[in-house]
Amino acid sequence: MRFLSLVAATYFMVSGGPYGIEDILGNAGYGKALLLLIVVPLIWSLPTSLMVGELASALPRDGGYYWWVQRSLGGFWGFQEAWLSLASSIFDMAIYPTISVLYLTRLAPAWTAGHYGTMWALAIMAVCAAWNLGGAKAVGEGSVGMFCLLISPFAVLVALGVWKGFFLHAAGGGLAALSRPVGAPALSGAVLVCLWNYMGWDNASTVAQEVENPQRNYPRAMLAATALVTLTYVLPLGAVAVTGMPADALSTGAWTDAAKLIGGPGILGTGLALAVVIGGILTGVGMFNALVMSYSRVPAALAEEGLLPAVLMRKTRAEVPWVSVVLCCMAWALALRLSFERLISIDLVLYGGALLLEFVSLVVLRVREPGLKRPFRVPGGVGGTIAIGVGPAALIVYALWAARDEHVAGIPSLLFATLVALAGALIYALALRGRRPALDPRMTQTAPE
């Protein structure tokens, strides 16, 4: 992957467009929602991007964050890093094909009725698995194309919204709309949704060996993607705000309604709404596709260490661990029918734990290996590496406190996620019992054409 492909793939691993930020509005209103979307990247996304930029450029190896933690903290914690990431994916990955199906329902409800919706979701998973077998370059270039397609209607929406709000003086619009309160404010809920929409910056690290000049491109791509994600959240939301559309009306999936309102009753409004729906379908496909590329490298890295079966190291001629891709997609397909709702607290325990291990690894490697070649460095020495982890850690602690009342399977969701995390220690012990000598990945078999 080249620079633009890495930026686009990272974008889909984190965001996938403005879809998903609507619920921030119902909890916070336009003014506070925009403030959150601007401030959170500064204390969450930017520090994480700097951390990924240094570690990915210093240790550019497929498996990314697993190798960082393994090298700095040892095999046990490296395995926990991989386990936390893969466990969180079970609660994450099934949602993205479902998003595509939900937007497809808006186009043709009969196509997704009953079991047809599940069949469409499985078809999306199969297409993305096949797409991934073409290699990181194919996924990255596809991400660039999908980004352009899904963001195009929002560029039109932003232009029309600003025109109506400031030049046509829409009723209730302009800057005054930013201070209008909502009926049932809940700032904690808004923060949780905002954090979820800014999660996943480290996922791009797992394909480092498949990136052109990773020492140079990772730091640049992380910073560029941070800016891009923030802009594609803030600008559409701000444009809708100045039109005077009530914040309570913009719930999940309501970008279509906003497009109709801003575009007007004629062909422009209808066409813009249709384009937004198509963009929603592409969002689910793009996010699932990019994350398959990311997560599938982790089991292959564990196999290199002898902790998983060697078959997971088998690669195609495009250097894709195809067995790992297939098995991961099968696991996510099984999760499609689970009754669990998306609970942000589960993600925050599992992903947050993995992220904190990465920040600890950043500091430990600075102390233990000061001579390690680092093409990009977090400024400020060891103190700087400690300082940039404070903001993300504080936000994780706050988010866990805010989600303390959520439940899943009849027990508190935080306890449920904690039990899943603790299971990693048991699984590591079992993996050690059957461990074989680490293998050289260059000796793995290649799949036939």
Image (cartoon, grey):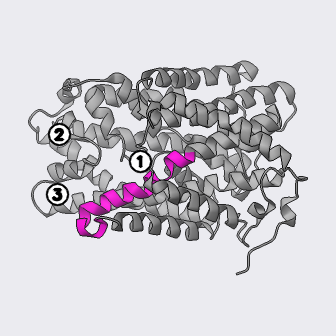
Badge 2 crowding class, 10 Å Cα cut-off, few under 14, some 14 to 19, many 20 or more, is many
Badge 1 crowding class, 10 Å Cα cut-off, few under 14, some 14 to 19, many 20 or more, is few
- The magenta region covers 89-113
Q: Where is residue 399 in the image (x, y as percent from the top left)?
A: 47, 25
Residue beneath disc 3: 269
Q: Position of residue 170 (x, y in %)?
A: 11, 39
Q: State left or right for residue 392 relative to residue 345.
A: right
For badge 3, the amino acid type reads Gly
In the image, 228 versus 368, the foreground residue is 368
Q: Which residue lies furthest to the front in this view?
A: 410
Q: Where is residue 139 in the image (x, y as percent from the top left)?
A: 57, 63
> Secondary structure beneath disc 2?
loop
> Secondary structure beneath disc 3?
helix
Residue occupying the point 22% across, 25% down? 184
243 to 12, vertically: above or below = above
How many labels, in total?
A: 3
Mark nearer the N terminus (1 vs 3): 3
Residue beneath disc 1: 339
Residue occupying the point 23% across, 53% down? 256
Q: Is residue 293 visible?
A: yes
For badge 2, the amino acid type reads Thr
Residue beneath disc 2: 243
Badge 3 crowding class, 10 Å Cα cut-off, few under 14, some 14 to 19, many 20 or more, is many
Q: Position of residue 446 (x, y in %)?
A: 78, 73
Q: How far apart are marks 2 and 3 (CA)?
A: 14 Å
Mark nearer the N terminus (2 vs 1): 2
243 to 322, vertically: above or below = above
In the image, 356 versus 381, the foreground residue is 356
For badge 1, the amino acid type reads Ser
